[in-house]
Amino acid sequence: MFILGVLSVLWPALSGVWSFNFYAEHPTVYRGPDGSYFGYSVDFYQATTDSNSISVLVGAPKANTSQPGIVEAGAVYYCPWPGLPDSCRQIPFDNSNNRMMKVNGTREPVEFKSHQWFGASVRTHKGKVVACAPLYHWRTVKLSGEKEPVGTCYVAIQNFSAYAEYSPCRTSDPDPEGQGFCQAGFSVDFTKEGRLVVGGPGSFYWQGQVMTAGIAEILNGYSLKAILRRVPGEKHTRAAEDTHDDSYLGYSVAVGEFTGDSEQELIAGVPRGAQSFGYVAMINSTNLTFIQNFTGEQMASYFGYSVAVTDLNGDGMDDVLVGAPLYMEREMESKPREVGRVYLYLQTAPLTFSQPVALTGTYTFGRFGTAIAPLGDVNQDGYNDVAVGCPFGGEERGGRVLIFNGNKDVSTQGLTLSQELRAARTPSGSLPGFGFTLHSLQPPSSFLTSTFHRFPPCTPPLPIPMFSHIAFLLFSGKLISQMKGV
Ligand SMILES: *[C@@H]1O[C@H](CO)[C@@H](O)[C@H](O)[C@H]1NC(C)=O
Ligand SMILES: *[C@@H]1O[C@H](CO)[C@@H](O)[C@H](O)[C@H]1NC(C)=O
Ligand SMILES: *[C@@H]1O[C@H](CO)[C@@H](O)[C@H](O)[C@H]1NC(C)=O
Ligand SMILES: *[C@@H]1O[C@H](CO)[C@@H](O)[C@H](O)[C@H]1NC(C)=O
Ligand SMILES: *[C@@H]1O[C@H](CO)[C@@H](O)[C@H](O)[C@H]1NC(C)=O
Ligand SMILES: *[C@@H]1O[C@H](CO)[C@@H](O)[C@H](O)[C@H]1NC(C)=O
């Protein structure tokens, strides 16, 4: 089913009050194969820093590929921008079948790429691209070969002319106690120098793990045969005591500067840590040790489901945003309502943060905070802005993207809601899931989001959320700077 141009500004009549709006009447829309979960992850892509052509990468973790004998490996699509809805093409990160090895005298597959969710995460950094398959399974070469979801990632450089695989949890000894259930690539990001940051929430009986590696080191000396290769210079967090089991470190990752030095720190969501209150860990990127925590406020709110870093009060210091999409609001004498919340921690000095400023969702079961995207300074007032996804919000539960503006006095005045975007009604009814994933282009002018074809079952977020058909991606409108002062 083709549904185009379905995004609109909710209250366009108020554009006189809000001079700088995302113009969302005619979004660019891309569409992938039915049932492929096209739009599960998105990012902008610039082939080279000097090229001014920008395109869009879209993950479709259940797409079929040309890999022989593999079902629903998942794919990442390259979509030219501007482009027609069906102009996206699969990027050939991996064309191969499962590798085989002689085990006990017979040749058997040692890896399992069917249903591996390649494209569940995709991220770009100055022409470098990483995309991951967190449910890629590997069996040991040992006789008792169990299949375990170690996860794997692929990197590409030089506009997809060089590829390499990076599977940090694939070891000769995978098991749940070690890195066997790692699901590496569940989350990914880059440092400002372009070092890869990978979250693997299943390592060590679901304690979870974060690792980093350089792209050059991943590419240098890469060979298809070296399955158990260790990348030089790779760093990773280690196992803790078993009281940390089932906490999912690395469910989300981000990067920022919080110590006033030149080395960025890592931020990682641990949504089931701290007795299910959830916390977010700040991690030293030099030796991957823990520096400090931000702890959630309410049990089972999934604090740390999403994390983002940007400076929202213009003081030159990075601030931290944390999403808790299952947060319940308890008003006096009324039943608690699950609305979701986003917490903003303002950095006031190196390693010093304000009490969190809370942004609370308004729609019951809306999952406000599922996605958080720093937008840069959209309204050109000198302060950065941020978008928050509320994918099942709205009266019709179709999903909303909320734009919040930064200001000098965020700590006392909070963030200002300036726009609420929705996918408009279509002949087939509403399009739920709008705002499930978000990514912006900086310098600011545009952002990407996606929507689903059908309503997903209302389960709590699992390590891999159980969504039904995500049919296509909406590419939302551009900033119209001429609207200034309208
Ligand atoms: C992938 O191919 C298999 C086998 O041909 C088919 O059953 C499945 O529906 C396809 N999945 C998608 C998402 O197209
Ligand atoms: C290895 O091969 C022998 C002989 O074919 C068989 O009896 C045994 O079960 C096999 N072991 C495993 C773990 O597959
Ligand atoms: C980069 O690769 C894409 C996808 O293969 C292609 O369409 C595009 O023309 C390439 N861009 C450059 C600058 O080579
Ligand atoms: C991070 O670890 C390095 C290496 O031990 C150390 O030099 C640096 O001071 C640490 N940074 C912080 C903020 O703890
Ligand atoms: C990492 O750096 C911190 C801060 O300098 C230090 O306290 C800690 O011992 C280091 N850990 C390792 C494993 O090197
Ligand atoms: C972070 O929180 C966890 C869980 O409560 C705790 O075990 C850990 O010691 C904390 N880390 C720091 C650096 O405070």
Image (spheres, helix red, strand yellow):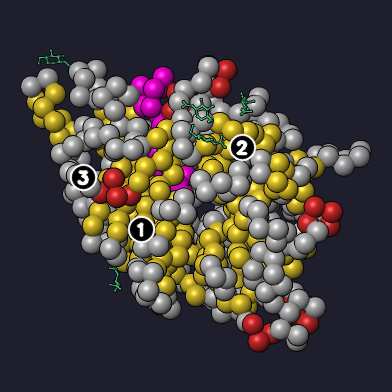
Q: Position of residue 291 (x, y in %)?
A: 59, 33
Closer to us: 381 or 463: 381
* Residue 119 shows in the view: no
Q: Amino acid at mark 3?
A: Tyr
Image vertical order of residue 445 relative to residue 124, above or below: below
Q: Residues within 10 Å of mark 2 (few under 14, many from 20)?
A: many
Query: Which element is circle 2 on?
Result: strand
Q: CA distance from mark 3 to mark 2?
A: 33 Å
Q: Amino acid at mark 2?
A: Val
Q: Is residue 195 left or right of residue 444?
A: left
- Tell which circle, 1 or 3, labels the residue nearer the N-terminal end: 1
Q: CA distance from mark 1 to mark 3?
A: 16 Å
The yes-or-no answer for disc 2 within 8 Å of ligand 6 is no
Res 234 → quadrant:
top left
Q: Residues within 10 Å of mark 1 (few under 14, many from 20)?
A: many
Look at mark 1 in the image and give the residue it sits on. Answer: 128
Closer to us: 140 or 284: 284
Q: Which residues are magenta?
A: 175-189
Look at mark 3 in the image and give the residue it sits on. Answer: 222
Query: Which element is circle 1 on?
Result: strand
Image vertical order of residue 124 relative to residue 246, above or below: below
- Is residue 24 located in the magenta-colored stretch of the structure? no
Res 243 → quadrant:
top right
Q: Amino acid at mark 1?
A: Lys
Q: Residue at x 30, y 42 (%)?
A: 166
